[in-house]
Amino acid sequence: MRTVELRPGEDSIRLGQLLKLVDAVPTGAQVKDVLVTGAVRVNGEPEERRGRQVRRGDVVSIEGAEDVRVA
């Protein structure tokens, strides 16, 4: 499982930003396409909102990629 550290002072990151940060999608325009397919889960629950705030301790699962824990 990969760990992504938030910047000091940040409590969360938007799901779309996280997906780009971990190279799960090449461009921001493709984030929505990936989310609509149901390939992304946050803490085991399917997620389609790219603006979803992902917080410390959350685990994001991306189909075909390594899980990501936000720290």
Image (cartoon, helix red, strand yellow):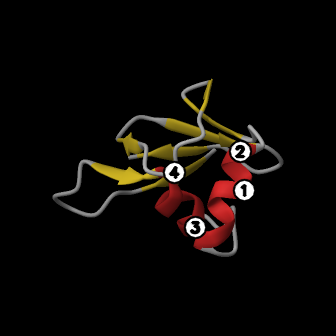
- Residue tagged by mark 2? 36
Cα distance between the residues tagged 2 and 1: 5 Å
Q: In this view, does 35 lie above or below 59?
A: below
Which amino acid, mark 3?
Lys
Badge 3: residue crowd in 10 Å (few <14, some 14–19, many ≥20): some
Badge 4: residue crowd in 10 Å (few <14, some 14–19, many ≥20): some
The reply to whether dot 3 and dot 4 touch (C-beta < 8 Å) is: no
Secondary structure beneath dot 2 equals helix
Cα distance between the residues tagged 3 and 4: 11 Å
- Residue tagged by mark 4? 50
The reply to whether dot 1 and dot 4 touch (C-beta < 8 Å) is: no
Residue 17: x and y in percent read 48, 63
How many labels sit on residues?
Answer: 4
Q: Mark 2 or mark 3, which is nearer the start of the sequence?
A: 3
Residue at 74% in and 37% down: 38
Q: Mark 4 or mark 3, which is nearer the start of the sequence?
A: 3
Residue 5: x and y in percent read 39, 57
Cα distance between the residues tagged 3 and 1: 13 Å
Residue 20 circle label: 3
Residue at 44% in and 46% down: 70
Secondary structure beneath dot 1 equals helix
- Residue tagged by mark 1? 33
Q: Mark 1 or mark 3, which is nearer the start of the sequence?
A: 3
Q: Mark 4 or mark 1, which is nearer the start of the sequence?
A: 1
- 34 sits to left or right of 20: right
